[in-house]
Image (cartoon, rainbow, N blue to C red):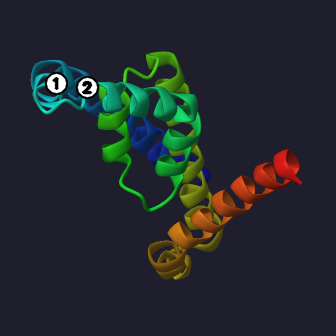
Amino acid sequence: RATGAVWGAAVALCASGLGGVLGYASGAFAYETLGQPILAAMGKGDAMAEFSERFNDFGFWAVLTAGITPFPYKVITIMSGWTGMPIGTFIASSILARGLRFFIVAGLLWKFGAPVRVFIERRLGLMFTRVVVLLIGGFFALRYL
């Protein structure tokens, strides 16, 4: 039933999106109240500012990668908040990444049924990771070769 698969993916996307925004907010709040004073006391405020700038330069790709690979998406949601990534960039990349993941899983389950579940659980994360590595390698090759 395609309708059930699409509905399940849509619900998962909405829940993940809300969770991502909460993670972003907690990262932004925790950094301002806890992280920034601790880093300043340790003399690392400048290092964090540099890290935040570099992270946000590639933030779209970081969120996209975490959203489709086995890397914990919640880590990137919190990091996106504490680095001050633009919320629009965060939301757009989250919707794209999580939507891809959930709708691909839904499509596979709809098309192949229960037998594909083992593949999804054991191999799909690896397949997504390979695609990301190939994309990054391709961009690198185009830029530097």
x, y percent for residue 102 = 51, 51
Q: Nearer the viewer, residue 47 or 107?
A: 47
Residue 53 marker: none
Q: Quadrant of the N terminus?
A: bottom right
- For marks 1 and 2, the one nearer the N-term is 1
Residue at screen point 44% across, 23% down: 85
* Image vertical order of residue 64 relative to residue 31, above or below: below
Tag 2: amino acid = Gly
Tag 1: amino acid = Ala
x, y percent for residue 56 = 50, 28
Q: Neighbour class for label 2 at 10 Å: few (<14), some, many (≥20)?
A: some
* Left or right: residue 65 compared with residue 138: left
Residue 45 marker: 2
Q: Neighbour class for label 1 at 10 Å: few (<14), some, many (≥20)?
A: few
Q: Is residue 5 visible?
A: no
Residue 40 marker: 1
* Left or right: residue 134 compared with residue 67: right
* Image vertical order of residue 126 relative to residue 140, above or below: below
> Distance from label 1 to label 2 (Cα)?
5 Å
Residue 81, image quadrant: top left
Q: Secondary structure at mark 1?
A: helix
Q: Secondary structure at mark 2?
A: helix
Q: How many numbered dots are placed on residues in this image? A: 2
